[in-house]
Amino acid sequence: MLTSVHTIAKHCSLFLGVTLGVLSFASCDQCDVKVEHVNRTGAVEETVAQLAICGMMCEIACVSKVKKELYDLPGVTRADIQFKEQNKVDTALVVFDPSVIQAETLIAAVQAIGDGLYAVKAAQVVHYAPEASR
């Protein structure tokens, strides 16, 4: 099992290294991201940022790194990434406390990884609140 994990990690690293130059010419350039805010009814009160991220190529290295960086931010309580290898854009769902951190900080943290290896193309922040509290 350990050999298999090392082989996959080595493959991802090699693939990542070969394609770094190609990424700069892809359609996923870093840009200013406008954050859309939406209020919805939910079972519990929470705030979730949905970040459309491009540049992730494998689950072991890329997805793990993005999740780690998001979890390291104060106010982030959960970070899940919906990743499929064939997608050009993947989605991070980040539950956070807006009184501690803002969505723009989440975006900046993702885009700072690897000196801009990943780009956030769009961001929507959904504020969920139970019906009784509205």
Image (cartoon, rainbow, N blue to C red):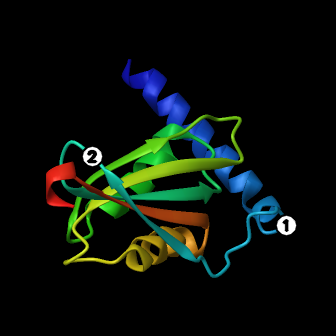
Q: Secondary structure at mark 1?
A: loop
Residue that sits furthest to the bottom in the current view: 32
Tell me the quadrant of the picture where the N terminus can be found. top left
What residue is rendered at 60% in x and 73% in y?
116
What residue is rendered at 53% in x and 65% in y?
123
The residue type indicated by label 1 comes to Phe
The residue type indicated by label 2 comes to Gly
Rate crowding at label 2 as few (under 14), some (14 to 19) or many (20 or more) other CA atoms within 10 Å.
few
Q: Is residue 122 above or below residue 105?
A: above
Image side of residue 17 versus residue 1, left or right: right
Rate crowding at label 1 as few (under 14), some (14 to 19) or many (20 or more) other CA atoms within 10 Å.
few
Splitting the image into 4 quarters, where does residue 119 fall?
bottom right
Which mark's residue is nearer the viewer, 1 or 2?
Answer: 2
Q: CA distance from mark 1 to mark 2?
A: 40 Å
Percent of width and height locating residue 111: 54, 72
What residue is rendered at 59% in x and 47% in y?
90
Q: Secondary structure at mark 2?
A: loop
Percent of width and height locating residue 83: 54, 39
- Residue under circle 2? 42
Residue that sits furthest to the top in the current view: 1
Tell me the quadrant of the picture where the C terminus can be found. bottom left
Residue in the foreground of this view, choosing between 79 and 6: 79
Residue in the foreground of this view, choosing between 70 and 36: 36
Residue in the foreground of this view, choosing between 70 and 18: 70
- Note whether residue 130 is visible: no
- Residue under circle 1? 25
Name the disc covering residue 5, or none: none
Q: Is residue 2 above or below residue 58?
A: above
Percent of width and height locating residue 131: 21, 50
